[in-house]
């Protein structure tokens, strides 16, 4: 078998009309998103004279706004089309990021919330468009490609944000965020990727709107909970890496270890996308959690980088698998809102993981940070599964009673 055989599924996906341009544009557009958090943090600490607690509160406002806004912008896309959504969110992002350098902290926090509420729907649009452009039997590869693109964007974005903020100024960094966000929205507006296939558009003609109770099924809820559990582990692992290396006196290696961890995720995503079959999304998430638990036993930076291989290889496959399942479960007419809920679940997990692990590290030891993150994520996934099964049984009993 040729050594290039694993590339064949990716070549077939990228050969489909408009897929290559969609992947490239969304990869570039996500770079400023990856830089946004660190740029705001450094602006609060270096320019406004606040502490990391104040910076965290600002980041939380942006995150909560994004989590609440993702389903809303997804529903707007379903009802009014992608271009109208992009027009509204691009103007909103330009207004927030261009005004942010001149706002005092007490005004910056509510502005960040509304900026998050009307974020560019980059993640949901990418996955929604891939579902419209790629046949169902190739979506595993397409969503793996999308997850790998996210990894690349979030490896480049924070480094670019730190470089701009430290070498020029935090105000320049925020202005650059605004310009980049507006350019990203403009590129997507011009590209105008389809959010439904031609067949789905024909089938939707004359049909009534799909009620939420019909498509928010128990299985979809389980997948959303699994998505939140996965990112809870990822954000907890971020904190665990920094805390462990600081405790070992090797904090300067934390950036390298995080970059290596991302590389393991890229490798796992590549393998996942080239396989004809894969484990269920919930099984991948539970593997991610279980394999994270023992990572804290590694003491030095190089041992930590190696210990992260198994769990890191599960990161991109888990995110890709959850997006793939939701693309199949949600009807095309509401796929934007469903992908928005997926984005909200991912964001909620990120928001939960960091403070949870941070509190544990402060009160105990960095060595158990990974164990707490993995156990919490696994418990969340199992709880979602149990609730889903319970709801199914209750629904079955009600149907029988009728």
Image (spheres, rainbow, N blue to C red):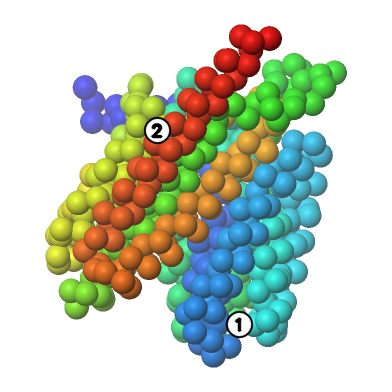
**Can you see residue 254?**
no
**Can you see residue 396?**
yes
Mark 1, secondary structure of its residue:
helix
- Quadrant of residue 210 in the image? top right
Q: Which residue is mark 1?
A: 171
Residue at image position (53%, 43%) is 23
Say which mark, if any, is on residue 282: 2
User: What is the quadrant of the C terminus in the image?
Assistant: top right
Locate residue 116, reporting x and y percent.
Answer: 65, 61
Say which mark, if any, is on residue 74: none
- Quadrant of residue 36 in the image? bottom right
Judging depth in this view, the residue of 283 and 204 nearest the camera is 283
Mark 2, secondary structure of its residue:
helix
Judging depth in this view, the residue of 397 and 86 nearest the camera is 397
> In the visual, does 392 lie left or right of 353?
right
Residue at image position (63%, 56%) is 66
**Vertical side of 127 occupied by 234: above or below:** below
């Amino acid at each position: 078998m040729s050594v290039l055989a694993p590339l064949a599924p990716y070549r077939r996906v990228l050969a489909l009309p408009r897929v290559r341009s969609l992947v490239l544009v969304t990869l570039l557009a996500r770079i400023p998103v990856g830089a946004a958090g660190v740029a705001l943090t450094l602006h609060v600490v270096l320019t406004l004279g606040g502490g990391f607690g104040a910076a965290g509160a600002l980041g939380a406002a942006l995150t909560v706004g994004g989590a609440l806004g993702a389903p809303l912008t997804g529903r707007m896309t379903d009802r009014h089309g992608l271009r109208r959504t992009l027009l509204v969110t691009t103007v909103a992002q330009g207004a927030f990021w261009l005004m942010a350098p001149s706002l005092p902290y007490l005004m910056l926090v509510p502005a960040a919330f509304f900026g998050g509420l009307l974020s560019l729907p980059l993640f949901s649009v990418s996955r929604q468009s891939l579902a419209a452009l790629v046949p169902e039997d190739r979506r595993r590869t397409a969503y793996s490609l999308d997850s790998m693109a996210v990894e690349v964007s979030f490896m480049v974005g924070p480094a670019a944000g730190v470089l701009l903020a430290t070498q020029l100024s935090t105000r320049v960094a925020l202005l650059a965020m605004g310009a980049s966000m507006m350019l990203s929205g403009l590129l997507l507006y011009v590209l105008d990727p389809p959010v439904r296939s031609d067949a789905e558009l024909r089938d939707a003609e004359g049909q009534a709107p799909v009620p939420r109770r019909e498509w928010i099924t128990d299985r979809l809820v389980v997948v959303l909970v699994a998505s939140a559990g996965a990112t809870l582990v990822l954000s907890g692992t971020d904190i665990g890496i920094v805390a462990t290396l600081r405790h070992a006196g090797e904090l300067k290696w934390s950036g390298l270890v995080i970059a290596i961890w991302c590389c393991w995720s890229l490798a796992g995503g590549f393998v996942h996308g080239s396989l004809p079959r894969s484990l269920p999304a919930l099984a991948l998430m539970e593997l991610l959690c279980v394999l994270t638990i023992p990572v804290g036993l590694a003491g030095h930076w190089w041992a930590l980088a190696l210990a992260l291989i198994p769990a890191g290889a599960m990161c991109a496959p888990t995110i890709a698998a959850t997006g793939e399942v939701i693309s199949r479960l949600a009807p095309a007419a509401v796929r934007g809102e469903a992908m928005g809920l997926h984005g909200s679940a991912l964001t909620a997990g990120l928001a939960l993981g960091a403070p949870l692990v941070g509190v544990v590290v402060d009160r105990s030891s960095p060595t158990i940070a990974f164990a707490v993150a993995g156990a919490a994520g696994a418990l969340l996934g199992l709880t979602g599964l149990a609730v889903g099964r319970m709801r199914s049984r209750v629904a079955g009993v009600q149907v029988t009673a009728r």
